[in-house]
Image: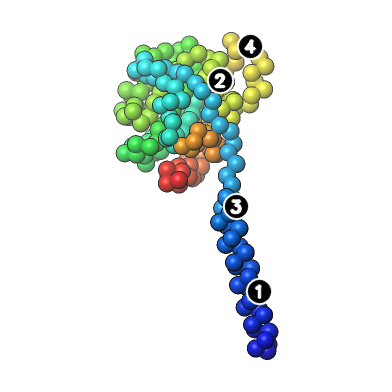
């Protein structure tokens, strides 16, 4: 290539780079793809294992993972909460992270029953919170906010429903559900821990 050709090449490369940097400065998200959340968390009001009210205000500005279980479950729930204990151990000293375990059987899982279960787990319930409340509110939260169960299940009478899901929702500091994970798959649990650490740095 001639000297003139090299000069033209350098000129156009510099021009393209300059154009790119200008776009990066003036257009938000030009260099980083915009994250599209799965869903977002609607206002809620439940009751903790200690009988205290717990609303969306308690999770404002925090990263958290939400799951559903019931204390008398003998199948997937023990597996999930063994895996959730790994999540707890990874973030037990992190003020900006919470675990919310909602019951899907509030008729059985009263406040005293949830307290008994929480005590048996031997965890800090300021970090790992066990929630009970109205069945319709709990189920609506799972289906509409966290999207870990099919909203079409709302078409049946609430008295006839029983939600039993192994899926977890990871929520960022803005209250957006960023991803859904299978809580009985250890590989997904490990991935969620990595993703949660990234969200804590955002």
Q: Earlier in the sequence, mark 2 or mark 3?
A: 3
Residue 155 visible to an observer of this rendering: yes
In the drawing, does residue 122 fall left or right of residue 148?
left
Which one is nearer the viewer's eye here, 59 or 158? 59
Q: Which residue is mark 2?
A: 139
Q: Residue 94's mark?
A: none
Please tell me which residue is depicted at 33% across the width and 28% down the height of the picture: 126
Instruction: Give the SS element for disc 3.
Output: loop
Q: Which residue is mark 1?
A: 12
> How much space separates mark 4 and mark 1, taking CA atoms?
67 Å
Depth check, mark 2 against mark 3: the one in front is 3
* Image location (x, y in percent) of residue 10: 62, 78
Please tell me which residue is depicted at 43% across the width and 25% down the height of the picture: 57
**Number of numbered discs on residues:** 4
Few, some or many residues within 10 Å of mark 2 (<14, 14–19, 20+): many
Instruction: Give the SS element for disc 1.
Output: helix
Residue 40 occupies which quadrant of the picture?
top right
Q: Earlier in the sequence, mark 2 or mark 1?
A: 1
Q: Quadrant of the N terminus?
A: bottom right
> How much space separates mark 2 and mark 1, taking CA atoms?
58 Å
Which one is nearer the viewer's eye here, 55 or 111? 55
């Amino acid at each position: 290539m001639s000297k003139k050709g090299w000069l033209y090449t350098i000129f156009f490369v510099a021009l393209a780079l300059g154009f790119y940097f200008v776009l990066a400065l003036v257009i938000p998200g030009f260099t980083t793809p915009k994250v599209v959340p799965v869903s977002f968390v609607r206002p809620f009001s439940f009751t903790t294992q200690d009988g205290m009210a717990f609303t969306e205000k308690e999770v404002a500005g925090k990263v958290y993972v939400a799951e559903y279980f019931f204390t008398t479950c003998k199948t997937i729930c023990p597996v999930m909460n063994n895996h959730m204990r790994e999540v707890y151990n990874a973030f037990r000293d992190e003020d900006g992270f919470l675990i919310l375990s909602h019951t899907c059987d509030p008729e059985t899982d009263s406040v005293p029953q949830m307290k008994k279960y929480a005590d048996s787990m031997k965890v800090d319930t300021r970090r790992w919170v066990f929630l009970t409340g109205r069945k319709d509110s709990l189920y609506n939260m799972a289906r509409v906010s966290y999207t870990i169960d099919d909203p079409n299940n709302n078409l049946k009478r609430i008295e006839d429903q029983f939600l039993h899901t192994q899926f977890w929702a990871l929520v960022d500091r803005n209250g957006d559900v960023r991803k859904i994970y299978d809580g009985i798959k250890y590989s997904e649990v490990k991935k969620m821990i990595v993703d949660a650490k990234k969200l804590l740095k955002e």
